[in-house]
């Protein structure tokens, strides 16, 4: 059920959410900020840059990655800009953080690990052979997705744990839960691997075969999320699909008129963005 549709003056490329605000990054280089509960815009941060291709928020900071390789950082309490990082040579496509580190991925084939707070570089991870389109971090591992390649590092040592190569498709987004690794691909698929395959005695084997492949989108899949017992995905086919954990489609949401670019979720409320210039807010209950 649709709760609200927000109209934006430009293509909405990326979303982020916290307990107070909904954030959207646009093609015309703005970050718009809404009160999450009242749906009223409270701030717009304008950047004189190329489009905003990545957005992330944590308890302290809001991060935006732009097309020319900059990472802009604001305090979330005041929205005061505190830093601009420039190490990527081209577009910053993915951003995430944990308690101690900022992780970024770019079209320059680099995954960069930054010390959070001082924002100095801890390490630059290479070897992806192609642009880094997606990044995810959980309690143990750092994941990065590029063309045909999912790389997994130990989060503490930054040693490579596993590399998974597939015959086609760029990995557009990654998500993990306690049991599985989920990746959405530009070849229209979603692939799922069991985490047990990362155990030391098993991960030494060269082939890590996916447990499941979902093929019900008609165009590239742009985002994958898992919420409770539901797998949620967005696609350039203008739809959002909600599945159970077995992969069966329970519902298809088709209110967007153009590519669905990103998803965010808070409790049981889903937020979707599109190049049709809208953000739709859905009640999943």
Image (spheres, helix red, strand yellow):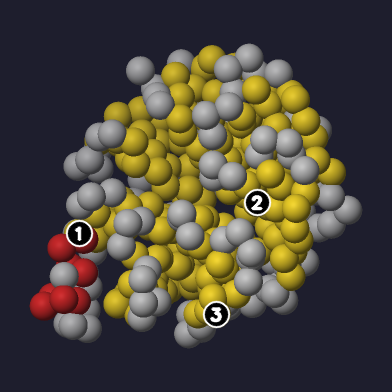
Asked if one can make out residue 233 in the rendered structure from this viewpoint, the answer is yes
> Which residue in the rendered view is the most extreme toward the right?
48
Looking at marks 3 and 2 on the same chain, the residue that comes earlier in the sequence is marked by 2
Q: Tag 3: Cα neighbours inside 10 Å, few (<14), some, or many (≥20)?
A: some
Counting residues from the start of the chain, the first of labels 3 and 1 encountered is 3
Q: Residue 262 falls in which quadrant of the image?
A: top right
Separation of marks 1 and 2 at Cα, in angstroms: 31 Å
Verify CB contact (< 8 Å) between mark 3 and mark 2. no
Residue 260 image position (x, y, % from top left) = 57, 41
| Residue found at x 59% / y 44% | 60
Where on the picture, by quarter, is residue 88? bottom right
The residue where tag 3 is placed is 124
The residue closer to the viewer here, 93 or 234, is 93
Q: Is residue 154 left or right of residue 112?
A: left
Q: Residue 220: x percent and y percent?
A: 50, 54
Find numbered disc 3 in the image and state the secondary structure of the residue it sits on: strand
Q: Is residue 215 above or below residue 108?
A: above
């Amino acid at each position: 059920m649709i709760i609200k549709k927000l109209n934006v003056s430009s293509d909405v490329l990326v979303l982020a959410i916290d307990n107070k605000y909904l954030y959207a990054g646009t093609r015309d280089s703005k970050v718009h900020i809404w009160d999450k509960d009242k749906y009223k815009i409270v701030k717009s941060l304008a950047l004189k840059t190329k489009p905003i291709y990545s957005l992330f928020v944590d308890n302290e900071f809001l991060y935006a990655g732009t097309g020319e390789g900059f990472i802009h950082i604001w305090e979330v309490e005041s929205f005061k800009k505190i830093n601009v990082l420039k190490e990527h040579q081209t577009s910053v496509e993915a951003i995430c953080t944990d308690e101690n580190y900022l992780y970024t991925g770019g079209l320059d084939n680099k995954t960069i690990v930054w010390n959070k707070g001082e924002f100095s570089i801890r390490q630059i991870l290479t070897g992806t052979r192609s642009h880094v389109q997606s990044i995810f971090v959980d309690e143990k591992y750092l994941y990065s997705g590029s063309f045909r390649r999912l790389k997994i590092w130990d989060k503490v040592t930054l040693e490579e744990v596993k590399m998974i190569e597939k015959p086609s498709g760029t990995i557009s987004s990654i998500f993990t839960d306690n049991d599985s690794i989920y990746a959405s691909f530009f070849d229209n698929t979603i692939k799922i691997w069991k985490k047990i395959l990362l155990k030391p005695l098993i991960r030494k084997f060269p082939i890590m075969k996916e447990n499941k492949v979902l093929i019900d989108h008609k165009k590239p899949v742009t985002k994958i999320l898992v919420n409770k017992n539901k797998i949620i995905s967005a696609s350039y086919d203008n739809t959002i699909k909600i599945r159970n954990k077995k992969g069966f489609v329970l519902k298809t949401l088709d209110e967007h008129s153009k590519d669905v670019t990103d998803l965010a979720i808070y409790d049981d409320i889903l937020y979707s963005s599109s190049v049709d210039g809208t953000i739709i807010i859905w009640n999943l209950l």
